[in-house]
Structures are given as structure tokens and as C-alpha cells.
Image (cartoon, helix red, strand yellow):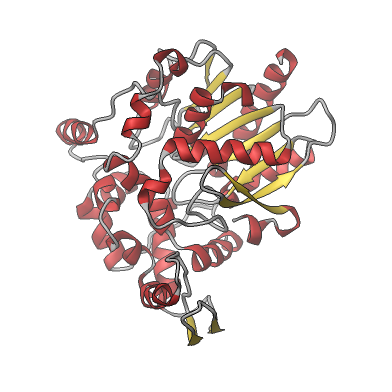
């Protein structure tokens, strides 16, 4: 989260046709020959998940723009899932680049950041000089995605519907309430008093007054104690536990993820999620929750982007600029071969470099990930 993790580099901009307020980390390049890295995170993340890349590449003189994506961190959190359409989010991402006058830019996406990065390639290919997709792939709007077919096939072949959690995240209210249990009452109460509905999270706090005009006062309790802390620790281990079989058992099927959260289950965190990082994650979630990010799944499964996706001409779906995809060889949901296979038909200048980790290469393998990014940046900058 830009405001918490990097207050000295924290900026905001109102962008896009909906005048959406975004928060982001901004560090200008030290010299004109250095490009910007434009880091687009996924779910359930914020710009804080790029901390290893922000620190490393800014020390090397590269420019950094790392937004809290729509619905996450300090960025605005529309409640309507239709506000999370890929075309709209792509326009807003480009708006941040425009606000900073960034010209020489390498886009880097992870997880849900990859669809947004893909649409920049389709709608505004002139804005970036190259693209990097971590643990996921370039996604053409012409590539069919049948989630029920994927689940049926994986259940037959692996015994697990690997993306059934998408249907859980598509439910109204239930997933966000389970991800942050004791937040819901203050959230609903505060919403009622605002003339314009918005996401407001007041966990581990006492609301001392509210007025119909929308002003409020809270007495903040210790955010490291109480049931909220127990639940966020459960959610963090659900997300980051690096043990073999964790995601197929506890994350992918609804029969795994729902009881995991209902029982506030905790499993070991890997060494690369330090106690300091856990403390920062608690602060981030206490201020922003998860509702916004969950709307990414809802907009897709409910077809919010379908018409706009269909209208993209096929010639715009092909990417001529350099592309690097980084599959994770230990990934248990998206097979490494699928990552390359999705990009190969559409990306003319494709590179594939694997990392031996699961879903979080920028966190689990920061040195190797940074080396891949730096070598790629040096190559494409020389050609640009």
C-alpha cells in the first residue's frame, strides 16, 4: 500500500473517464536513459508486494510507478463490480502514466495485473516499450476462458477443481466477510451514513459518532490485538503458505477455502514473509479490506467486460513489442506450459524464463526475479 509502505514516494492522481482517484508509488528515473518500471499487482495485493523490486530498481536509477490497483490499498474502491471492467482499468492505468509524463516504460504484471497489462497492449501499445508477465501470461481477448471447463478437467485429471474459488469469490458479501470477519458491522454502519455509498473499513475500532453528512470519529483500539488479528493472520497464511499441496487443498476448492476462513485456520508462513511484513499487511488490510479486489472476479464471471472484449479487433490482439513471461515451475494452479502456451500465438517477440517457486516470484525469489527484469530491461532499452 503506497501510503503506508512508501509515504515519501506516495502520490495520487484522478484519472480515467470516471475520474477515479488512484494512489501509487512514484520515483522518477535518475537519468534519461533509464526507463520506468510500471508494476501492476494482482489479488489480494497492493503496491507493497513489489517492495523488493521498488527498493532494488530505484537504487539502480530506474523509475518506478507502482499503483494500488482499483479497489485496493489507498486507491478508490467503487462498490459496483462493473467499475472493474478491464477496459476502464486499462484507461486508468494509462492515465497514471500520462499524469507523470512517463514515456519510456516497461510494464510488469502479476496475477490480476496481467489482464490489465494485456489490455494496455491492445488499446495503447504505444505507451509501453515492453511487457513482463509474472506467474501468469499475456491474455488475448480472443482466447476463450471457460472456468467451468477448467474446473471439470482439473477435477478429472488432478482430483481438484483448481479454480472453484472463483465461484466463491463471486458470491455477494460472503467472501469479504470471511476474509476480515469483525470488519463488517462498522463497514455497514458507516456506509449507511454516507450520501454516496463507498467502502469504509474501521476494524478494531470504536465508532464514537456518525452524522448524516458523512463525518465520523473513531477511537482506535490496538490493531495488533483481537479477533481481527487472528483472522488476518489466517488470511495471510491462506494466501502465502508455501507448503506443497496447500493451494489445491485449502485454496482452490470451496470445500477447502470456506472452512479454512470460517475456522480462522493458520498454517506456517514462508521465511520471505517476515514479521515486519505481517505487521504491514495487517495495517494495509485494516484500512482497505478485500471487497474491491474481489470485484475483479465478479466483473469477469458476470460478463461486465464481455462486450468491450468482443469489440477489440483481432489485429490489436497481437503484440509486436518484446514480451517476457515468467512461469513458476512449482505453481499448483496454473501449469507453466499454460503460461507460455497462452502467449505464444499472440506475442511475436516472446521470451520465456522460468523460476522455481510457486505463485509469488517477486517475493519468494526476489534476486532471480530482479535479475530477469534487469536483463530484459537492458535488452529492450538498447533497442528502443
View extreme (right): residue:
31
Judge whether 359 appears above or below 238 on screen: above
Snapshot quadrant of residue 171: bottom left
- Mark yes or no: residue 364 visible: yes
Nearest to the observer: residue 124 or residue 29: 124
Q: Total number of numbered labels?
A: 0
- Mark yes or no: residue 135 visible: no
Horizontal and vertical percent for residue 125? Answer: 57, 22
Nearest to the observer: residue 77 or residue 375: 77
Describe residue 127's horizontal placement relative to residue 378 as left or right: left
Judge whether 65 appears above or below 328 on screen: below
Snapshot quadrant of residue 157: top left
- Residue under the point 41% across and 72% down: 191
Horizontal and vertical percent for residue 88? Answer: 47, 39
In which quadrant is the N terminus drawn? bottom right
Horizontal and vertical percent for residue 101? Answer: 73, 35
- Residue under the point 44% across and 58% down: 236
Nearest to the observer: residue 342 or residue 26: 26
Describe residue 86's horizontal placement relative to residue 307 as left or right: right
View extreme (bottom): residue:
208
Describe residue 328's horizontal placement relative to residue 58 as left or right: left
Horizontal and vertical percent for residue 349? Answer: 54, 12
In which quadrant is the C terminus drawn? top right
Judge whether 215 appears above or below 29 on screen: below
Nearest to the observer: residue 280 or residue 380: 380
Amino acid at each position: 500500500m503506497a501510503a503506508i509502505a512508501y509515504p515519501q514516494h506516495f502520490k495520487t492522481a484522478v484519472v480515467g473517464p470516471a475520474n477515479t482517484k488512484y494512489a501509487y508509488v512514484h520515483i522518477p528515473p535518475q537519468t534519461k536513459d533509464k526507463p520506468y518500471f510500471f508494476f501492476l499487482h494482482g489479488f489480494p495485493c497492493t503496491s507493497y508486494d513489489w517492495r523488493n523490486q521498488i527498493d532494488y530498481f530505484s537504487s539502480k536509477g530506474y523509475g518506478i510507478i507502482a499503483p494500488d490497483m482499483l479497489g485496493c490499498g489507498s486507491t478508490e474502491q467503487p462498490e459496483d463490480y462493473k467499475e472493474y471492467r478491464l477496459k476502464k482499468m486499462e484507461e486508468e492505468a494509462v492515465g497514471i502514466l500520462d499524469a507523470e509524463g512517463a514515456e519510456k516504460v516497461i510494464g510488469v504484471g502479476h496475477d490480476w495485473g496481467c489482464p490489465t497489462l494485456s489490455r494496455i497492449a491492445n488499446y495503447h501499445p504505444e505507451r509501453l516499450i515492453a511487457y513482463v508477465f509474472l506467474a501468469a501470461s499475456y491474455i488475448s481477448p480472443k482466447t476463450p476462458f471457460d472456468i467451468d471447463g477448467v474446473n471439470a478437467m482439473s477435477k478429472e485429471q488432478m482430483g481438484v477443481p483448481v479454480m472453484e474459488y472463483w465461484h466463491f469469490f463471486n458470491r455477494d458479501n460472503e467472501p469479504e466477510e470471511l476474509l476480515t470477519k469483525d470488519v463488517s458491522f462498522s463497514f455497514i454502519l458507516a456506509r449507511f451514513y454516507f450520501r454516496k455509498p463507498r467502502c469504509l473499513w474501521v476494524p478494531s475500532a470504536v465508532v464514537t459518532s456518525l452524522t448524516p453528512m458523512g463525518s465520523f470519529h473513531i477511537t482506535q483500539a490496538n490493531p495488533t490485538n483481537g479477533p481481527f488479528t487472528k483472522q488476518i493472520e489466517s488470511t495471510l497464511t491462506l494466501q502465502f503458505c508455501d507448503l506443497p499441496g496447500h493451494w489445491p487443498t485449502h485454496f482452490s476448492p470451496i470445500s477447502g477455502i470456506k472452512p479454512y476462513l470460517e475456522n480462522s485456520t493458520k498454517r506456517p508462513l514462508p521465511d520471505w514473509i517476515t514479521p515486519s511484513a505481517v505487521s504491514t499487511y495487517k495495517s494495509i488490510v485494516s484500512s482497505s479490506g478485500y471487497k474491491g479486489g474481489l470485484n475483479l472476479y465478479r466483473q469477469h464471471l458476470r460478463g461486465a467486460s464481455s462486450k468491450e472484449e468482443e469489440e477489440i479487433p483481432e489485429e490489436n490482439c497481437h503484440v509486436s513489442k518484446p514480451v517476457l513471461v515468467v512461469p513458476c515451475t512449482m505453481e499448483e494452479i496454473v501449469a507453466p506450459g499454460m503460461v507460455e502456451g497462452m502467449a505464444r500465438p499472440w506475442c511475436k517477440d516472446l521470451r520465456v524464463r522460468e523460476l522455481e517457486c510457486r505463485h509469488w516470484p517477486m517475493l519468494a525469489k526476489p534476486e532471480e526475479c530482479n535479475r530477469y527484469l534487469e536483463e530484459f530491461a537492458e535488452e529492450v532499452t538498447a533497442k528502443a
